[in-house]
Amino acid sequence: MRMTISITFFFCFPPPDLVGLDDDKLKAWDKVNPDKRVCSLCEGQEDSHEHLFFECSFSKQIWQQVKCYAGLSGSDFSIDNIIQDIIPFAMKRSSKSICAKLVVAAASFFIWQERNNRLFRSEKRSVDNVVACIFNTVRLKLVSFTWKKSRAVLDIMKLWKIESIRLQD
């Protein structure tokens, strides 16, 4: 049941060398005009990490649907606010912190994957399909854990519509 916050931050903040390589590949493949790169999700704003994950209308719809499952229902759509909400329990191994980290990591990953699929493969999924991928991925991970029996874990099972999980007494 061990998961560190570094996984979540890797998805939210890819290392600069990976971002640079991505920009170089885009230029080399001539997929975009390097002077004005447009978001492949909303096609309305200039592409940037802040826009892609938190300002884009496509991403906002995803965050709106998944944030309550992460216990971040009070968060607005900025990385600063999400981090402020996660930091108090980020290093804990409580069921709440595990769910929050999994949801943030999965949402970030699937938003990034959708961006890449649209940019490099010309494949598009709807917001509902991306959210379903996030829910299925997190649900599968939650089911794979062995949990200590508690009220919080039972609440998670109910929230995520999980029929049975491995419980320790």
Image (cartoon, grey):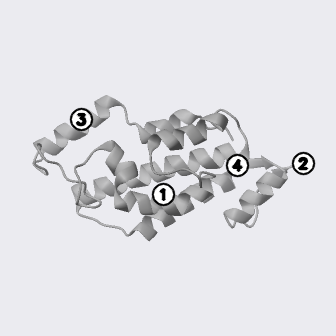
Q: Nearer the viewer, residue 92 or 1?
A: 92
Q: Can residue 55 be seen in this view?
A: yes
Badge 1: few (under 14), some or many (20 or more) residues near its Cα, within 10 Å? many
Mark carried by residue 63:
1
Label located before the other in sequence (1 or 4): 1
Please state which amino acid type lies under the numbered disc 2.
Answer: Asp
Measured as percent of width and height from the top left, residue 111 is found at 39, 54
Instruction: Identify the residue under disc 4.
Output: 145
Q: Residue 125's x, y, as percent? A: 35, 67
Q: What element carries label 2?
A: loop
Q: Which of marks 2 and 1 is nearer the N terminus?
A: 1
Between residues 31 and 87, which one lies in front from this camera angle?
87
User: Circle 3 sits on which residue?
Assistant: 21
Cβ–Cβ below 8 Å for labels 1 and 3?
A: no
Which is more foreground, mark 1 or mark 3? 1
Q: Quadrant of the N terminus?
A: top right
Give the x, y percent position of residue 46: 22, 50
Q: Which residue sits at x=70%, y=35%?
A: 92
Choose the circle earlier in sequence order: 3 or 4.
3
Distance CA(mark 4)–CA(mark 2): 14 Å
Question: How far apart are labels 2 and 3 at the CA level?
Answer: 49 Å
Amino acid type at image mark 1 = Trp
**Alpha-carbon span between mark 1 and mark 3:** 27 Å
* Mark 3 or 4: the one toward you: 3
Residue found at the very far right of the displayed protein: 169
Looking at the picture, tell me which residue is in the foreground, 131 or 80: 80
- N-term mark: 4 or 2: 4
N-terminal of the pair, mark 1 or mark 3, is 3
Q: Which of 25 and 156 is in front in this view?
A: 156
